[in-house]
């Protein structure tokens, strides 16, 4: 398993660096990145999984969100991000497939070393609904690999001094999701997922914050219009991925301790350059029934 | 445990190693880079270059050579404030939160208008009684009755508050029986446009388009989106259609100018005082600089229904009347006196 994690780290960072430092090769590096990261999710050794005896799984837990942001719609400056996090997850296991809903909310501040006066509050919300099917050639008794579509809604809202400056990024996306679940032994198991948006609806405010339609929808409380009035695109408009890892420790037959980590990256030039990388750590409990 | 350690290692490497890779290089905090960001942002996004027909390239030509790597913060502040002074616009501002320096373009006019107005003088010398509105409903609002005249007086010092239509109904239940009302928006820095509409709803004769806004949406100075028209609210239940005077000065800004615009659209309203500031349209978000300063500018072009730009020009009064500092020091508000005189001369109200 060490090979798995080492290769994963190396793949992520090498491809990341190459991607950002060679803009002329962005397209090629993007595909290389996808390939390396997907490959890094496949363990070098495979063992015999212990089939999950229960159909339903609910996980809840608090956590911490840490990240980095440069949203030129909001500011030319780079910011560090930190805040509390709460996540809820439900999954239903079938013989050869999994259905999962994941909900996460985080709030906190972004800060820049330029000035303590520029500290800005943020709210982050994420909903994903995935249906994935097992890929038999890659699965065995201990390991199960799944592949399938996922719908994701993601919103990130910034507010400085009661909307003296604000910005947001909202995306609805249809993702390709790859999941791996690995049973180490009776007490320990691991899970990982990589999802890559394929089709996106990107919602961004105008640069100067003024938009009559946005203002009208806001005044009328038309939340649906606020989060859907955007433009469609694929990899030509936005590059993003979400990589999540979970470690489960069985406390009882039905209750697990959960330690989760998620790394997400979004990059787009839609309505000015936006780059956001963040890491989420969660500590929670998982009930199976 | 070994597995868990690698799990943590992966997370930490990703956490601490990717900032620069994820965000790209940071903006340099040099005088030149701050200047370029500042000038370029106005150039690409400000509406006022078009509405006031400013030669922004010439501003670059004059000031860019003055910015050197050794330029001090004080010198850069002088350069920036001189650059935006060409707009003479109260919606254009620059702030250094560290030193609490705040500069508003055209602020010399505001300073003169502040010296030429005294609410305390009006309440002491011209009013029979004064009722101050609870600050929870409106932070800077009071009303009363002109001494020995059948004229009401309303002053709004901040275009903000809660439930403005009901608020005006309450005021009119007290002074609505009077033959005329003087609506004073002098020394008002502005506020919410929707408040301006609602607080004047009782004075509306009919519902009609009052103004339109266009937002700059492209690199060209005259790249604006489609006009969005704004209509007044008509409070048909509690109307006051008797003679109304609206008083303004150079420090009647933004929301105060909207109040004036809504009122002036009615035939029973006369505008007396000085030309307003000419800062109608909504401002941009505050924009941030690598040296810790922030600034904003108008992002829209406001027009009358006839298509005449209001930004930068202000509302010209029907009757010009201007106070001086000496008038106030002498215990006189000649603008208010002119309004009282006008009501007598025109409507025989006293």
Image (cartoon, coloured by chain):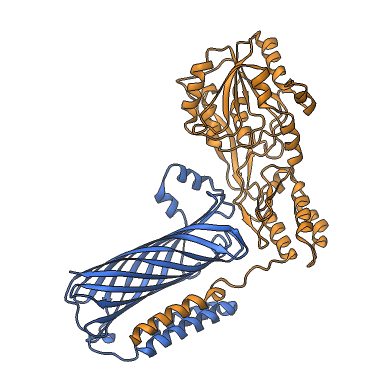
Q: Is residue B63 left or right of residue B42?
A: right
Q: Position of residue B350 (x, y in %)?
A: 65, 9
Which quadrant of the view contains residue B76? Answer: bottom right
Q: Is residue B325 left or right of residue B98?
A: right
- Residue A275: in sight, yes or no? no
Rendering colour (chain B): orange
The answer to whether B199 is drawn above or below residue A281 in the figure is: above
Q: Position of residue A90 (x, y in %)?
A: 26, 66
The total of numbered circles placed on residues is 0
Q: Look at 68% across and 39% down and name the residue there.
A: B311
Q: Nearer the viewer, residue A33 or B304?
A: A33
Q: Is residue B152 left or right of residue A181?
A: right
Q: Is residue A23 left or right of residue A196?
A: right
Which quadrant of the view contains residue B143? Answer: top right
The answer to whether B186 is drawn above or below residue A193 in the figure is: above
Q: Look at 56% across and 12% down and name the residue there.
A: B178
Q: Position of residue A7 (x, y in %)?
A: 42, 87
Q: Nearer the viewer, residue A42 or B96?
A: B96
- Residue B230: in sight, yes or no? yes
Q: Look at 54% across and 73% down and name the residue there.
A: B19
Rendering colour (chain A): blue
Q: Position of residue A205 (x, y in %)?
A: 52, 54
Q: Quadrant of the N terminus of chain B?
A: bottom left
The answer to whether A135 is drawn above or below residue A258 in the figure is: below
């Amino acid at each position: 398993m060490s090979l798995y994690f080492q290769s994963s780290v190396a793949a992520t960072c090498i491809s990341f660096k190459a991607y950002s430092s060679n803009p002329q090769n962005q397209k090629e590096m993007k595909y290389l990145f996808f390939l390396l990261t997907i490959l890094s999710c496949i363990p070098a050794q495979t063992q015999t999984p212990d089939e999950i005896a229960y159909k339903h799984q609910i996980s809840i837990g608090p956590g911490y969100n840490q990240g980095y942001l440069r949203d030129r719609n909001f500011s030319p400056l780079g910011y560090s991000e930190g805040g509390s996090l709460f996540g809820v997850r439900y999954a239903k296991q079938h013989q050869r497939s999994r259905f999962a809903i994941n909900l996460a909310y985080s709030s906190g501040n972004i800060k820049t070393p330029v000035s303590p006066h520029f500290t800005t509050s943020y709210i982050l919300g994420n909903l994903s609904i995935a249906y994935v099917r097992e890929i038999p050639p890659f699965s065995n008794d201990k390991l199960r690999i799944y592949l399938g579509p996922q719908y994701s809604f993601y919103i990130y809202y910034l507010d400085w001094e009661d909307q003296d400056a604000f910005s947001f990024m909202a995306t609805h996306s249809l993702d390709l999701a790859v999941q791996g679940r690995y049973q180490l032994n009776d007490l320990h198991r691991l899970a990982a997922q990589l999802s890559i948006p394929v089709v996106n609806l990107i919602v961004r405010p105008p640069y100067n914050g003024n938009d009559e339609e946005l203002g009208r929808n806001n005044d009328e409380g038309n939340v649906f219009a606020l989060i859907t009035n955007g433009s469609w695109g694929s990899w030509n408009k936005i590059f993003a991925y979400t990589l999540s890892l979970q470690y489960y420790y069985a406390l009882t037959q039905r209750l697990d301790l959960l330690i989760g980590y998620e790394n997400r990256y979004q990059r787009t030039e839609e309505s000015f350059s936006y780059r956001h990388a963040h890491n989420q750590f969660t500590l929670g409990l998982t009930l199976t029934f | 445990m070994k597995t868990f350690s690698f799990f943590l290692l992966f997370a930490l490497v990703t956490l601490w190693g990717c900032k620069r890779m994820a965000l790209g290089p940071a903006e340099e905090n040099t005088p030149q880079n701050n200047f370029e960001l500042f000038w370029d942002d106005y150039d690409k996004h400000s509406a006022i270059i078009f509405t006031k027909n400013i030669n922004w390239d010439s501003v670059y030509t004059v000031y860019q050579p003055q910015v050197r790597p050794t330029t001090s913060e004080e010198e850069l502040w002088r350069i920036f404030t001189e650059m935006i002074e060409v707009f003479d616009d109260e919606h254009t501002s620059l702030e250094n939160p560290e030193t609490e320096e705040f500069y508003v373009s055209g602020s010399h006019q505001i300073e003169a208008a502040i010296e030429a107005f005294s609410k305390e003088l009006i309440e002491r010398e011209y009013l029979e009684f004064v009722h101050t509105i609870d600050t929870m409903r409106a932070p800077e609002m009071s009303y009363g009755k002109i001494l020995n005249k059948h004229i009401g007086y309303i002053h709004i010092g901040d275009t903000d508050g809660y439930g403005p239509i009901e608020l005006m109904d309450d005021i009119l239940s007290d002074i609505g029986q009077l033959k005329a009302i003087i609506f004073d928006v002098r020394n008002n820095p502005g506020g919410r446009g929707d408040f301006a509409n609602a607080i004047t709803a009782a004075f509306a004769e009919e519902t009609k388009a009052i103004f339109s806004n266009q937002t700059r949406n492209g690199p060209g100075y005259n790249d604006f989106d489609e006009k969005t028209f704004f209509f007044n609210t008509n409070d048909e239940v509690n109307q006051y259609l008797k003679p109304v005077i609206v008083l303004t000065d150079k420090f009647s800004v933004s929301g105060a100018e909207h109040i004036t615009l809504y009122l002036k659209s009615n035939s029973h309203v006369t505008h007396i005082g000085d030309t307003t500031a000419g800062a109608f349209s909504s401002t941009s978000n505050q924009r941030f600089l690598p040296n810790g300063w922030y600034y904003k500018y108008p992002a829209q072009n406001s027009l009358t229904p006839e298509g005449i730009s209001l930004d930068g020009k202000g509302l010209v009064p029907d009757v010009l009347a201007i106070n001086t500092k000496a008038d106030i020091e002498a215990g006189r508000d000649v603008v208010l006196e002119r309004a009282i005189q006008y009501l007598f001369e025109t409507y025989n109200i006293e």
